[in-house]
Amino acid sequence: MSKDSSALLTVRDAAERLGVTPRTLKYYEERGLVSPTRSEGRYRLYDEEDLKRFGRILRLRSLGFSLHSITEMLKRPLEPVEGGHRYSTDSLRQIRDAISDQVEALDARIETMRRELKEAQKLRAELSPDLDYLERRLAGENADALLEQRRNAFAKAGNTPPAKRAKKSGEPT
């Protein structure tokens, strides 16, 4: 333990001082936003720098920034300016670029998921009549009558029944 133990706070004391729950502090640690020291008994101990970092995280959260954005911001140093500290223009550009990359990656994932959802919905629509047929057969309905209903439904919809489509395309039946 390299930090001066007289200036260290337990998770409960730090949470009280910051006006949050101990679980909030633990969550931010789990997300890699802070790394408190540990006592010999493995208790979390926070120093003034940890509290300042938590304060910064909490201020950014109150402004509506996501934890992903906050993570990017914490990677960049603040520069002293009159009345406080601010990000430099270069840091702001780096933060913007990192967040923009994340948004682009998410857009690509969303598009992939949309395609997969469309395929899943199509497959579900194809399987539903088969499931209905099987459930009705298991309930004791006549197989010939059910098959006739299926053929009529396909003809009415202008579709080719699955068995005939498979034969035409060379798929196994």
Image: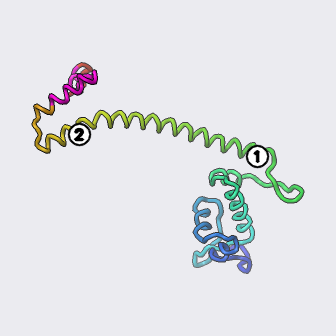
> What segment carries the magenta color?
147-167
Q: Which residue in the structure is indicated by mark 1?
A: 92
Q: Is residue 162 magenta?
A: yes
Say left or right for 12 vs 133.
Answer: right
Q: Which quarter of the rendering shows the N terminus?
A: bottom right
Q: Across the whole image, how many numbered discs are drawn on residues?
A: 2
Q: Is residue 78 above or below residue 20?
A: above
Q: Residue at x 66, y 41 (%)?
A: 100
Secondary structure of the residue carrying numbered label 1: helix
**Label 2 is placed on what type of residue?**
Leu
Q: Residue furthest right?
A: 82
Is residue 48 shown in magenta? no
Residue depicted at 74% across the width and 66% down the height: 52
Q: Percent from the top left, x then y, of residue 83?
A: 87, 59
Q: Residues within 10 Å of mark 2 (few under 14, many from 20)?
A: few
From the top left corner, tell me how far across and down residue 138 is, in percent: 14, 44
In this picture, residue 140 sits left or right of residue 172: left
Q: Is residue 150 left or right of residue 7?
A: left
Kindly identify the residue that appears in the image at 48 percent across and 36 percent down: 112
Residue ID at (65%, 68%)? 36
Please tell me in which quadrant of the rendered image residue 18 appears.
Answer: bottom right
Please give the label number shown on residue 127: none
Disc number lying in front (2 or 1) = 2
Observer-nearest of 161 and 87: 161
Q: Nearer the viewer, residue 56 or 153?
A: 153
Q: Is residue 134 left or right of residue 28?
A: left
Residue extending furthest toward the front? 156
Which amino acid is tagged 1? Leu
Q: Taking 165 as reference, is 123 above or below it?
A: below
**Which residue is denoted by mark 2 in the rendering?**
131
